[in-house]
């Protein structure tokens, strides 16, 4: 009788009639309390009914009866996985697989658990093993996504393309490939986003990403309309509690979007905080009587050949070692650059935690008795805000990297000044502002400038022209800013514009735009990105004046220019300066910046 009730329950369970299945299993267990099939399937049904804790009690009883049954151990692992108890789930996956050979799906689920707790290399290994056993797109895709997150673009590309060959119409794979190429190869990114939108015209993340890509390609067609559409999509997703269709960093490209930045940051940080809400909280009794020196920790993924490290390269040499001890927690890939070596050698303690999970990093910070933890990523890619969400330090601070608000309750302060964050923008920050009195960035004052190529002709530039230069990444420009530069070229015959370009197609787009506004191709010279900094600074020194953008301005780019002894000016366009009141506000808030208000030359 009991067996028949169990069999009947299995039939209902197969049909997803979980209530009826539960009734059958309860009757079976009344007659045979140790019926392990009924116990295990009761646990599975309870999971579907969202009664996870009750379900675990049944699976535990089944395991107590058959301690080494690998299937029961695996069921428990899966239930714990669904409950988001990833460390516990991994322990049971391992127990099961020590007895029984894993399937590709088992390895994939283990990879998901490893990834959830930040053990990224182990997660990738699991995904790749799963794919080698059974080539499925999801296995390659997850490996690619994780490589992408870690900044390893070449293996990410390889695994994305593996996944795409298996599922050529997958919008998720197409979108991820577009994201991979978005900054470095914007034309390829555009092709993937366009292909995606032919399959699913309503894929909102692709629409917003395409807006960003078009900025990198100097494709400003219907710019104002696209800005409004992008803002509306983001506002809609926040209002309806849907997935936000834009990367937090991309929002900085939208003019007048401070409030939107704040809302997005708040949503992202709230989700992070919720994901760690069940973790134990740290107590800071061990710090209450801690003696000097003060322990300050810095955490970043960008310790290496990255603009952030160019800025902070000599920062740690200037701390008073009698009053402050500095710790650096680097969770980015080791790139063997001199910048990483310099920072490692100049701070007091350096921790390479690239392959550590979030909890282990947080535990390390806590055990080091860090009193002030400074995050240098914010909402940029490769961040570990999940570590800060665990609250391993009593005071947590944001500096550099991302100037917008994280919207996080677990970050107390942001270090900036009243130029980076004007007073009227305080309302868009959850963090309290620590306003530095003058400068904002800690600049390396010992950067070398190459001497072997120090003439304009070395870069194909004319000797007899006044050279305006912009080496900002193309996405930072807007048509309003470029129109203003064209106004300068129209007003000054002996002036040329030297500008960074992604590729020849982007160059053609830019020249066509300028031609329609009366500026010919001979007024433009183009530069490609240069990776060796000494040579980049030498090249930059050939300019007469750096013109900075307005919606997204340069930080490391402008610092480089000033170090190369080239002045920097930020040009304000007419439709940003509507009247004398706005002009006075600009002069008040940007008191260290010189402004000239130019006439606008419309098409």
Image: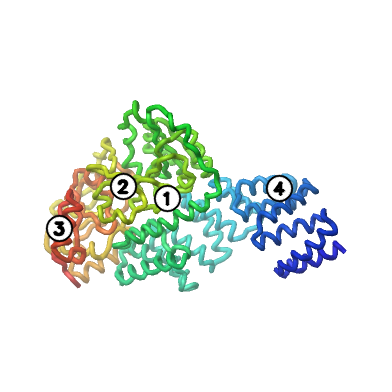
Residue 44 visible in image:
yes
Name the mark nearer the viewer: 3 or 4: 3
**Residue bearing mark 2:** 433
**Residue bearing mark 1:** 409
The residue depicted at 40 percent of the width and 27 percent of the height is 291
In the rendered image, which quarter contains the N terminus? bottom right
Answer with left or right where residue 453 lies relative to residue 185. left
Name the mark nearer the viewer: 4 or 1: 1
Q: Is residue 451 above or below residue 292?
A: below
Labels 1 & 2 near each other (Cβ < 8 A)? no
Q: How many marks?
A: 4
The residue depicted at 37 percent of the width and 28 percent of the height is 293
Q: x, y (%) of residue 537? A: 26, 44
Q: Quadrant of residue 21?
A: bottom right
Say whether disc 3 or disc 1 marks the residue closer to the N-terminus.
Answer: 1
Answer with left or right where residue 17 lies relative to residue 173. right
**Residue bearing mark 4:** 97
Rate crowding at label 2 as few (under 14), some (14 to 19) or many (20 or more) other CA atoms within 10 Å. Answer: some
């Amino acid at each position: 009788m009991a067996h028949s009730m169990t069999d009947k329950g299995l039939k209902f369970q197969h049909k997803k009639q979980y209530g009826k299945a539960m009734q059958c299993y309860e009757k079976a267990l009344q007659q045979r309390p140790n019926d392990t099939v009924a116990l295990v399937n009761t646990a599975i049904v309870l999971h579907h009914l969202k009664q996870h804790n009750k379900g675990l009690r049944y699976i535990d009883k089944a395991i107590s009866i058959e301690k080494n049954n690998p299937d029961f151990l695996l069921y428990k692992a899966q239930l714990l996985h669904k409950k988001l108890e990833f460390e516990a789930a991994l322990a049971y996956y391992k127990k099961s697989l020590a007895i029984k050979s894993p399937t590709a799906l088992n390895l994939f689920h283990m990879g998901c658990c490893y990834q959830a707790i930040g053990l990224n290399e182990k997660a990738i290994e699991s995904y790749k093993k799963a794919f080698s056993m059974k080539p499925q797109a999801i296995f390659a895709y997850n490996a690619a996504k994780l490589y992408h997150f870690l900044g390893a673009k070449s293996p990410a590309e390889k695994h994305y393309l593996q996944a795409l060959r298996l599922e050529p119409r997958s919008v998720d794979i197409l979108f991820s490939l577009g994201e991979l190429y978005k900054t470095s190869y914007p034309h390829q990114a555009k092709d993937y986003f366009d292909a995606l939108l032919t399959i699913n015209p309503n894929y909102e993340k692709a629409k917003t990403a395409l807006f960003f890509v078009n900025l990198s390609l100097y494709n400003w067609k219907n710019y104002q309309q696209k800005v409004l559409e992008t803002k509306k999509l983001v506002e809609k997703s926040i209002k309806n509690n849907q997935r936000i269709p834009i990367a937090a960093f991309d929002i900085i490209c939208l003019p007048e979007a401070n409030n939107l930045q704040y809302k997005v940051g708040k949503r992202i940080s709230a989700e992070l905080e919720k994901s760690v809400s069940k973790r134990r909280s740290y107590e800071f009794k061990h710090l209450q009587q801690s003696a000097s020196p003060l322990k300050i920790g810095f955490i970043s993924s960008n310790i290496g050949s990255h603009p952030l490290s160019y800025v902070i390269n000599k920062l740690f040499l200037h701390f008073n070692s009698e009053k402050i001890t500095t710790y650096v927690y680097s969770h980015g890939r080791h790139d063997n650059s001199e910048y990483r070596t310099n920072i490692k050698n100049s701070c007091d303690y350096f921790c390479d935690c690239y392959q550590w999970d979030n909890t282990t990093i947080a535990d390390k910070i806590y055990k080091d008795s860090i009193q002030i933890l400074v995050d240098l990523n914010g909402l940029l890619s490769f961040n570990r805000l999940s570590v800060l969400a665990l609250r391993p330090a009593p005071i947590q601070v944001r500096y550099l990297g991302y100037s917008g608000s994280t919207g996080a309750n677990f970050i107390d302060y942001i270090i900036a000044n009243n130029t980076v964050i004007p007073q009227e923008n305080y309302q868009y920050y959850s963090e309290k502002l620590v306003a530095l009195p003058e400068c904002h960035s800690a600049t390396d004052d010992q950067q070398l400038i190459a001497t072997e190529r120090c003439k304009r002709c070395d870069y194909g530039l004319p000797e007899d022209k006044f050279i305006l230069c912009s080496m900002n990444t193309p996405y930072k420009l807007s048509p309003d800013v470029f129109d203003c530069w064209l106004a300068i070229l129209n007003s000054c015959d002996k002036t040329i514009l030297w500008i960074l370009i992604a590729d020849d197609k982007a160059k053609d787009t830019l020249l066509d735009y300028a031609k329609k506004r009366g500026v010919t191709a001979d007024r433009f010279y183009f530069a490609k990105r240069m990776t060796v900094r000494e040579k980049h600074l030498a090249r930059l020194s050939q300019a007469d004046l750096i013109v900075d953008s307005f919606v997204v301005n340069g930080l490391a780019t402008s610092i480089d220019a000033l170090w190369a002894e080239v002045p920097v000016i930020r040009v304000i366009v007419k439709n940003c300066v509507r009247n004398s009141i706005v002009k006075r506000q600009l002069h008040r808030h940007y008191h260290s910046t010189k402004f000239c208000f130019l006439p606008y030359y419309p098409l």
